[in-house]
């Protein structure tokens, strides 16, 4: 083992179940995993079956990267099964929903 790997400044590992949980809307929870000094950040979003965002989710100030880890995600236009990657450019929007429930990995490179 090379323990010096873990001692590197900024090197971070987070177990999802240990990340704090915040309910954004009924049945929709976010778990913050990491935030960089420039504002970039990574989260896990959990949506219970039958949940939907109550309004447009606008991507500002930068893009949103989404990877569907489990379940099926709907952006308001179509379904995306587990294993799907989506890139939503800055200024774009969608209306997140899930009939089956889903877990998403979200990355915001520009905050």
Image (cartoon, helix red, strand yellow):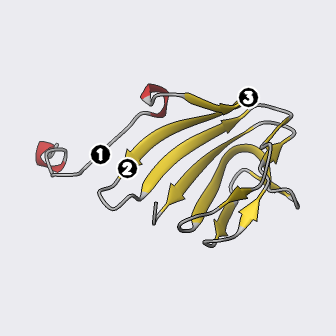
Residue 52: percent from the left, percent from the top?
Answer: 81, 41
The residue carrying mark 3 is: 27
Tell me how far mark 3 sits from mark 1, CA to CA: 28 Å
Kindly report the distance in space between the C-alpha atoms of the residues bearing marks 3 and 2.
24 Å
Q: How far, Cα to Cα, is label 1 from label 2? A: 10 Å
- Name the mark nearer the viewer: 3 or 1: 3
Q: Which badge, 3 or 1, is on the more N-terminal residue?
A: 1
Position above or below: 23 against 14: above
Q: Residues within 10 Å of mark 2 (few under 14, many from 20)?
A: some
Q: Position of residue 99 (x, y in %)?
A: 87, 39
Please name the residue that numbered disc 2 is placed on. 35
Whole-percent x, y for residue 41 in the image: 44, 53
Residue in the picture at 43% in, 42% down: 33
Q: Which of the numbered marks, if any, corresponds to residue 12?
A: 1
Task: Where is residue 65? Give x, y as percent.
Answer: 58, 62
| Rendered image quadrant of residue 12 | top left
Q: Note whether 39 is above or below 1 in the view shown.
A: below
Q: Who is closer to the viewer here, 1 or 58?
A: 58
């Amino acid at each position: 083992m090379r323990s010096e790997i873990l001692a590197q400044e900024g090197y971070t590992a987070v177990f999802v179940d240990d990340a704090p949980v915040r309910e954004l809307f009924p049945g929709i929870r976010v778990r913050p995993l990491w935030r960089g000094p420039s504002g970039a950040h990574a989260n896990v979003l959990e949506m219970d079956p039958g949940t939907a965002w109550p309004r447009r989710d606008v991507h500002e100030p930068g893009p949103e990267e989404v990877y569907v880890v489990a379940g099926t995600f709907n952006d308001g236009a179509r379904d995306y099964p587990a294993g799907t990657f989506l890139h939503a450019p800055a200024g774009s929007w969608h209306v997140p929903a899930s009939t089956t429930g889903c877990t998403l990995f979200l990355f915001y490179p520009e905050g």
